[in-house]
Every structure is written in structure tokens, then in C-alpha cells.
Amino acid sequence: MAAFLAVSRTSVWKSIQALQSDGYVIEGSPRLGYRLLIIPDHLYPAEITGNLHTKRIAINREMIHHYHQVESTNTTLKNLADKDAPEGTIVVAEEQIGGRGRQGRFWLSPPGKGIWLSLLLRPPLPPQDTPVFTLLAAAAVAKSLKIILPELAVGIKWPNDLLINKRKVCGILTELKAEAEFLHYLVIGIGINVNFREKDFTPELRKIATSLYLENGRKNVSRQRLTSVLLNELDKSYTELLSDGPRSIIGQWKKDNITLGKKVVVKTVREAFEGKAVDLNEDGSLIVEGKNGIRKHFHAGEVTLVPMNGG
Ligand code: BTN
């Protein structure tokens, strides 16, 4: 190995030691060399890129920024975007200490337990066309979970919460920098609760949130594999959106949604509107029909699903 890499034996040994202390299990045997037995589930670029076949997202290692700890991957990526980082750049962290959810909420992001990832896009579209990107991300996460854990029933609650057994497993926070007519960039932040045990949630959160581990018969799920599959799916959908418009994204979202056809309450800053969610508009807005038959389009809001007849 030392000869192949043109370095000293000591430097090979030092690198092996560093990898071992990072969780890589490597067996060493005199005269035979080293054997890699276990790769830890860190989201290092080198462990993700091997399985990517993307055209726009993370097309080289330099476009994946990995951190052990950040405040928020969205904030880190916005700083990179302001310094002209290219479209398709991603930031991924093992831990967020100031993870942000929608409406200024805190997003619990303990080390190694989830996928805390942000993606930078610079689509040539006006700012008013951006809500569909959140739907795109939600549909891509749903598709990736189906690929990795086909037995789980994952549903999307409008616009972008992913639920399993009525509990939230993934949230998406899309932020943008724009002028009235011009979009500079979009940062799509995705948080997936992957290997949380019950004790990793606060008691309050555990009532409404879950993890893939808990729903998967208490078996760990590979964050590396899920991240690669997700980046491939995001790339496919984004390419499709640019070439064919939002129709197929809307179709995919509808296929995996658990909102349409249900009785809902939509809370906005102005009102709490109760009715039946009847359709999703091409621009991503939710169409809700009130008791009086009047239909309202919601572009933003918090949806609560109201059980119907004990359902
Ligand atoms: C929500 O449902 O409220 C949205 C949660 C979004 C969380 C993700 S984790 C990665 C990215 N960085 C953040 O600070 N937030 C998003």
C-alpha cells in the first residue's frame, strides 16, 4: 500500500489509525496488509458519491460540503450561495445545533441520527413558480423511502410533511433569495428522522414525530444509502421539471399524498378554514371546499387532518 501510494509505512499506519478512531473497522495482518470490515454511517462525500448518477446535483465531491456540526445546513448553504456556489451544491451535517423548521420552529437534529441536508438550486424561473419545488422535494423523499423501505406506508401532508402512522418523519424548509421578478436561488432544506430511538425525542415531540428506525421494526437504516437514493431522485425530478414543467411533479405528489379527499383545517395568519381538501392546483396551492361549497386556494398554511367518522 505504501509503495502504491508512494508514502511511508508510518503514514499508512497513521491514516489507518485515524480511520479506525473514526469508526472504520479495519483488520491488520502482518505481511498481508489491511482489510476494511465495516464502514461507519457518516455522510462523507466519499461514501455518497459512488452511488450517484446525477446530472445537476452534487456532480462532484467539491459540491458536497460535509460538516460534523453546524447551526443550520440552510444557513451554511445560503452563505455559500451568496459567494456564488454553483447550482447543485449541497450541505450535509451530522448534527445541527440551531436546526430550523417552518414558522420559526426549532428542528431537533442530534448527531448521526438523521439526514440534515440542504440543496442549492438556481432555476431559470420567476419567484412565484417556486412553491412547486417544495412539493418536488416531498415527492422525492417519499419515492426514496419507498425504494429503501417498501413496506412502510409513507404519506405526504400538504405541502411537505412526510408522515408514517400519523407521525412526522420528515420536514422540508424551502428558503429563497429573490427580487420581485428575479429569483437568485432556492435553498431546499430536508430533515429526515432516520435512526432516532424514543429517548432521542423530547416527550412532547414523541407524540407527533417518529423515525424510520422506530417504524422499521427497530432496525437501523443506512443514512448513506438513503442520502444517495434521495439525491438521485431529486436530480431526476428537477431535470424533469425543467424540461416538462410541473405536471409530472404534481402527479407524483398526488400519488403519495394523504391530504386530498380528507377533511382538513388550514390555519393561516388570517384564519382557520375548515373544509374538504379537494385538489392540488398546478401552482402547488391546495384547494379546499368549505361547508357552503365555496372553494379557497391556499398557498401557505398549516394543515391539520380531521378524522372523519372515527377514521
Ligand atoms: C419543518 O417541517 O418545519 C421543516 C423542517 C426542516 C428541517 C431541515 S433539516 C436541514 C435543513 N436545515 C435546517 O435548519 N432546516 C432544514
Image (tube, grey):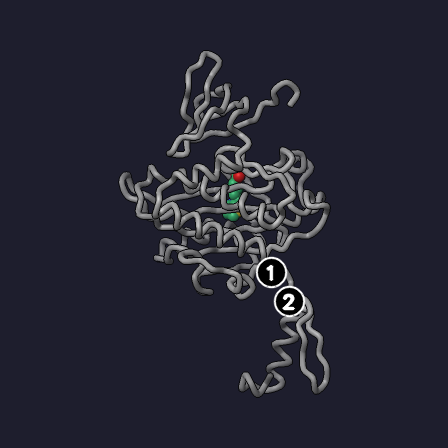
Q: Is residue 30 left or right of residue 176?
A: right
Q: Where residue 203 appears, x then y in whole percent?
A: 69, 37
Q: Where residue 239 appears, x then y in whole percent?
A: 39, 50
Residue found at the very far left of the displayed protein = 181
Residue found at the very far top of the displayed protein = 292
Q: Residue at x 37, y 34 (%)?
A: 283
Q: Residue at x 53, y 45 (%)?
A: 143
Give the residue at mark 1.
Answer: 42
Give the residue at mark 2.
Answer: 22
Residue 306 visible in this rendered orientation of the protein: yes
For the residue pair 113 and 221, the one nearer the viewer reads as 221
Asked if the residues shown at circle 2 and circle 1 are in contact, with their CB atoms under 8 angstroms apart, the answer is: yes
Q: Residue at x 60, y 41 (%)?
A: 169
Residue 99 visible in this rendered orientation of the protein: no
Q: Is residue 280 left or right of residue 163?
A: left
Q: Which mark is residue 271?
A: none
Q: Mark 1 belongs to which amino acid? A: His
